[in-house]
C-alpha cells in the first residue's frame, strides 16, 4: 500500500483529527461511502433518463455515467495510508484507511503549496534575514 505525504502549514493536530474521521467513515462497520455512491448512482440514472427523454432519444450519455462510477470506485473504494507532517516542527502522524481520492488530492495540493512557499521565501527574503524552514529537512 502506498503512503501519501501531506505537509500541513497550519495546525497538524487538527488535520490529523480530520483524517481520522475520514478513516472512521471508511471503516468496515460503516458503509457511508457505499450509501453515498448508491445515492449518486441513482441520481445519475435519473439524469441520464431525463436527458434521453428530453432529447427525444437522440442523446443517451451513458459513457459519462460509467466513467463517473469508475472514478468513484477508484477514489473512494480504495484506502491508503497518509503521513501528515507539520511544516514548522517536523512532527509526523500516520493515519491508515483514508480514502485514496482524499489522500491523492491532499498530497498534490500540499506539495504544490510547500513548493510555492519555498520559492516565495527564496525570492522575497532579505539578505541575512531568518526564513521559515522545515526543521527536519535541513
Image (spheres, rainbow, N blue to C red):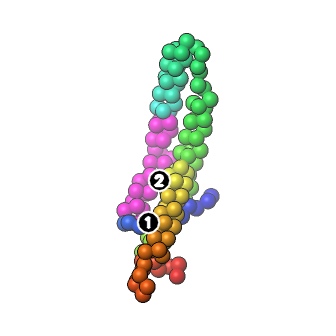
| Residue at (41% x, 53% y) in the render | 21
Is residue 20 visible to the viewer in this orientation of the structure?
Answer: yes
Lower position in the chain sequence, tag 1 or tag 2: 1
| Residue at (44% x, 65% y) in the render | 8
Of 123 and 35, the residue lying toward us = 123
Q: Point out which mark residue 45 bears.
A: none
As drawn, 93 above or below 67: below
The single residue placed furthest to the bottom in the displayed view is 128
In the rendering, at what x and y percent does residue 84 appear? 48, 65
The boundaries of the magenta stretch are 12-37
For the residues labelled 1 and 2, the Cα–Cα distance comes to: 18 Å
| Residue at (40% x, 56% y) in the render | 18
| Residue at (60% x, 16% y) in the render | 58
As drawn, 92 above or below 51: below
Q: Residues within 10 Å of mark 1 (few under 14, many from 20)?
A: many
In the rendering, at what x and y percent does residue 126 appear? 41, 81
Of 117 and 31, the residue lying toward us = 117
Q: Point out which mark residue 8 bears.
A: 1
Amino acid at each position: 500500500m502506498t503512503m501519501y505525504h501531506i505537509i500541513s502549514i497550519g495546525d497538524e493536530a487538527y488535520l490529523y483529527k480530520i483524517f481520522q474521521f475520514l478513516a472512521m467513515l471508511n471503516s468496515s462497520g460503516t458503509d457511508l461511502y457505499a450509501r453515498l455512491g448508491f445515492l449518486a448512482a441513482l441520481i445519475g440514472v435519473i439524469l441520464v433518463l431525463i436527458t434521453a427523454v428530453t432529447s427525444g432519444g437522440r442523446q443517451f450519455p451513458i459513457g459519462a455515467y460509467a466513467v463517473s462510477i469508475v472514478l468513484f470506485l477508484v477514489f473512494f473504494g480504495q484506502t491508503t495510508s497518509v503521513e501528515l507532517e507539520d511544516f514548522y516542527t517536523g512532527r509526523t502522524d500516520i493515519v491508515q484507511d483514508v480514502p485514496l481520492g482524499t489522500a491523492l488530492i491532499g498530497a498534490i495540493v500540499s506539495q504544490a503549496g510547500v513548493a510555492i512557499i519555498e520559492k516565495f521565501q527564496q525570492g522575497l527574503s532579505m539578505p541575512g534575514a531568518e526564513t521559515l524552514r522545515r526543521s527536519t529537512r535541513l
